[in-house]
Amino acid sequence: MKRRVQRRPATGLSGPAMARAFTALRRRWARVRPRAALVLGSGWGEMAEGFAPRGEISYAEIPALGATGVEGHAGRLLWAGPEERALLIFQGRRHWYEGVGWTPVALPVYLARRWGASAMILTNAAGGIRPGLSVGDLMIVRDHINAMGVHPLVGPHDPFWGTRFPDQGRVYDPLLRRLLREAGAEVGLQMEEGVYVAVSGPTYETPAEVEAFRRWGADAVGMSTVPEAILANAAGLRVAALSCIGNLAAGRAETPLSHEDVARASAEAAPRMRAVLLEFWQRLLEYAER
């Protein structure tokens, strides 16, 4: 008689796998005590060097995370700053559309929470929907719309992620949004706030979809961030998210959309992106030490 093999479904989170990853990392970085975690999405990877990282581990070496499947995502976990108030930096992210389930997407949030961090900062490249948003602009996420058709908390309930039905009224922390605005003003940027709509990808949106999202009230669209924000908020972390408008969404752009154009736009905006993140981190540390 054939032995029946139990397979974990693509939906649902593997608590034991994430716990093993945390144990392995804590063994290697025993003295690190993070205050916050930063996820560097598409176009943001080079920002890590501005924090002068002191430790590095490849995603491929981290159980349940694995190498990234998207060009431009380095796939390295770094830490920077003093050990007792460190910043965990995830240089690249895993995406739902890679087809590996929710566990790799959720792991950065899980690690941050288990490690004692109090805040999660998410970054991404997004398509600009709202008229007035231009390529290279930075947008603070005020709220989101989940149009992915899936949800990271589907499956058996794990109390680690809070209640069975987490409130979504204030996912993006008002204090962190204020600190981002202040950081932008300090470096000479007047940053917009807006609503980010997440789709599953990996295709870009059709003009009809973009028009529908505009009517819903979305200002920018992308393929990430919302799952991590949902999880981080559910787990009790303060959440902030910052988008770089890497392209104009379909129907606004005159040329076909491409990942290369998004990367090029992010590279041109890199000095502004770096300045805002570094100033924000200093303000977050100062606030935490009051």
Image (spheres, grey):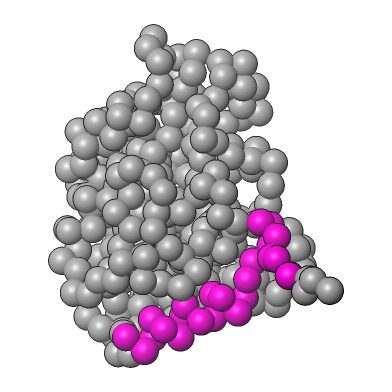
Residue 276 percent across, percent down from the top left: 26, 50
In magenta segment, residue 81? no
> Which quadrant of the figure has residue 213?
top right
Span colored in magenta = 5-28
- Residue at the location (25% across, 45% down)? 273
Query: Relative to 230, does residue 207 appear above or below in the rendering?
Result: above
Q: Is residue 109 visible?
A: no
Q: Is residue 1 left or right of residue 255?
A: right
> Which quadrant of the figure has residue 53?
bottom left
Query: Relative to 286, does residue 172 appear above or below in the rendering?
Result: above
From the image, which quarter does the N terminus lie in? Answer: bottom right
Q: Is residue 98 left or right of residue 47?
A: right
Residue 227 percent across, percent down from the top left: 57, 53
Residue 222 percent across, percent down from the top left: 49, 37
Residue 230 percent across, percent down from the top left: 60, 57
92 and 275: which is toward the camera: 92
